Image: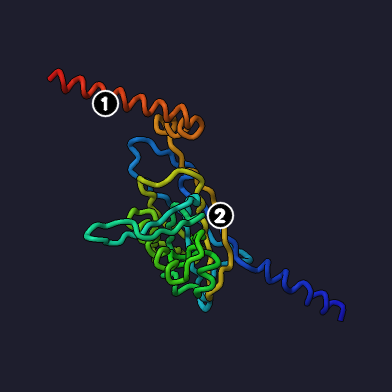
Amino acid sequence: MRRAGALALLAPLLMGQAKPELVPDVSQRDIEIAYSFTGAELLLFGAILYPGGRAPGEGERPADIVVVIKGPTESVVVREKSKVAGIWVNAAQMHYRSAPSFYAMASSRPIRQLVDERTRAIYELGLDSLQLSPASGATPQIQQRFDSGLVDLKRRNGLFYEAPGAVEITGGVLYRARLTIPARVPVGRFTAETFLIRDGRVLAAAVRPIEIRKSGFERFVATSADRNAVAYGLVAVGVSFLFGWGAGALWRRF
């Protein structure tokens, strides 16, 4: 009886140990943006470690992989335009305290076929499941309209996108996916999240950091603007004045 009781107490731990694990990696941990930067392609790859080192059997349902790259959060103001007397003007706006500056998701199958709406919301799997944190207390209908507008704007700029079917799984163990980083991507600390999903449940998750930063003259300008804002502003005004004066002098001469 004591042995049976001990096994009953250890059962949850044994079940937890029986879950598969992820060993992910990314082709580039550091991306430098120079004046000639036209974008980058990241290869996200890894392996699924099953209990006992075995691969899924023939009668076992295969697992799926979802990979998400997120950029640093930022404060965003979305303005809605309206036509008044034949002129387009800003009619309404909504402020978001923290929205991802970049979001890309690749999956072995369409995400709606893998998990339900609640799970998508918990792990932010998919553009329609992002937690955008609006600062205003608008009605759900108005908030949904602005959320859709923000996502659509980011998508048209190449900063938000989904790639269903872009994850390849070999032998049920090895996986890989390619995601594109556009040229206008913001700088900062990014995360590459990998999720192992089976039977509608997230069985394992792992995160790898990615650093995107400016290099060369672009880095010097960005650092100067951040650390010495007043001096940077004065220099910028002075340079603009000199260029304007020089252009005027050349115009008068010729």
- Within 10 Å of disc 1 (Cα), the crowding (few <14, some 14-19, many 20+) is few
Mark 2: secondary structure:
strand
Where residue 213 appears, as percent x and y from the top left, is 46, 39
Whether residue 92 is visible, yes or no, is: yes
Where residue 124 appears, as percent x and y from the top left, is 50, 64
Which quarter of the figure has residue 32?
A: top left
The residue positioned 65% from the left and 68% from the top of the image is 18
Sequence-earlier tag: 2 or 1 = 2
Provide the residue designation for mark 2. Answer: 207
Q: CA distance from mark 2 to mark 1?
A: 50 Å
Which quarter of the figure has residue 241?
A: top left
Provide the residue designation for mark 1. Answer: 244
Where residue 6 appears, as percent x and y from the top left, is 82, 74
Q: In this view of the protein, which residue sits in the foreground, 41 or 72?
A: 72
What kind of residue is marked 1? Gly
Whether residue 155 is visible, yes or no, is: no
The residue furthest bottom is 1
What kind of residue is marked 2? Val
The residue positioned 48% from the left and 73% from the top of the image is 114
The quadrant of the picture occupied by the N terminus is bottom right
The residue furthest front is 85
Side of 211 where 10 appears, left or right:
right
The residue positioned 36% from the left and 46% from the top of the image is 184
Side of 34 where 85 appears, left or right:
left
Where residue 237 appears, as percent x and y from the top left, is 37, 28
Q: In this view of the protein, which residue sits in the foreground, 72 or 140?
A: 140
Q: In this view of the protein, which residue sits in the foreground, 49 or 226?
A: 226
Side of 5 where 139 appears, left or right:
left
Residue 96's mark? none
Mark 1: secondary structure:
helix
The residue furthest top is 253
